[in-house]
Amino acid sequence: MNVAQQLHQLQEIDLEIEANEGALRQITRQIGESEVVARAQKKLASERQHLEELQHQQHATEWEIDDLTAKITPAEEKLYSGRITSTKELANLQHEVDGFKAHRGQLEDKVLEIMEQVEQAEASVATTGEELKKLETEWQNQQQQLSADMERVKAVLADLRHKRQVLSDKIDPQMVSLYQQLRKQKVTAVARVEQGICGGCRISLSTANLQQVRSGSLVQCTNCGRLLYLA
Ligand SMILES: [Zn+2]
């Protein structure tokens, strides 16, 4: 293998290293907090709070009803006891009892309404809870997959870096340094020559240039500056 071919192989390894480094960055970005899960958690928390508020409202209204019943029962007993003989007093008491009962009726309607809302809120909490559980399971599976992928990519990278070291140790350091300078400017520093054309810039090589490539010496394309090699 001549220098150009060795540098080409080095480039192949470098491109592979870069691709794996990109994959590793992508995996690293995906590992950790999940926005979707966090959103679902927030939604569930707010739905639970709403449910608690409704339940509290229901109980408060039920207590109010109990209080009214506690007033109505003795008042009615008094009303029908025969102890009160004054017509006016009887009428007043009856009026008071009617007022309590009307208010209690309103509160009973309110409780029914609240109970309906409680039922809906409970259904929402159940649905969101299930959604969250599903999302968390998916996320956990994804995280496990990502961790496995990360380990695999890290192993591949370690292997590639080792291969690169072994190969670059065999090449003239000056050539490696020239290659690295070119790599900073271009994605590919080494271009394959096919049918007399530079694979980097698609320009036909001069006869002299082509001859040099064929002889195995390291030549740069006169147009794009890439190192040329024959496969
Ligand atoms: Zn070229």
Image (cartoon, rainbow, N blue to C red):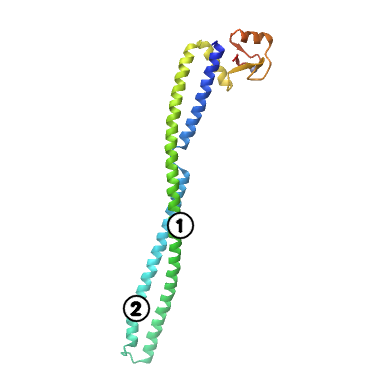
Label 2: element kind: helix
Side (left or right) of 180 relative to 91: right
**Sequence-wise first label, 1 or 2:** 2
Quadrant location, the C terminus: top right
What amino acid is at disc 2? Lys
Q: Check the image and report above or below for 41 versus 88.
A: above
Residue occupying the point 34% across, 86% down:
79
Whereabouts is ligand 1, in terms of quadrant?
top right
Residue occupying the point 49% across, 33% down:
26
Whether label 1 lies within 8 Å of ligand 1 gets the answer: no
Side (left or right) of 79 relative to 201: left
What amino acid is at disc 1? Ser
Q: Where does the image place residue 38, in percent across and percent down from the top left?
A: 45, 46
Residue occupying the point 45% across, 39% down:
142
Q: Where does the image place residue 93, in percent across and percent down from the top left?
A: 37, 85
Numbered mark located on residue 71 in the image: 2
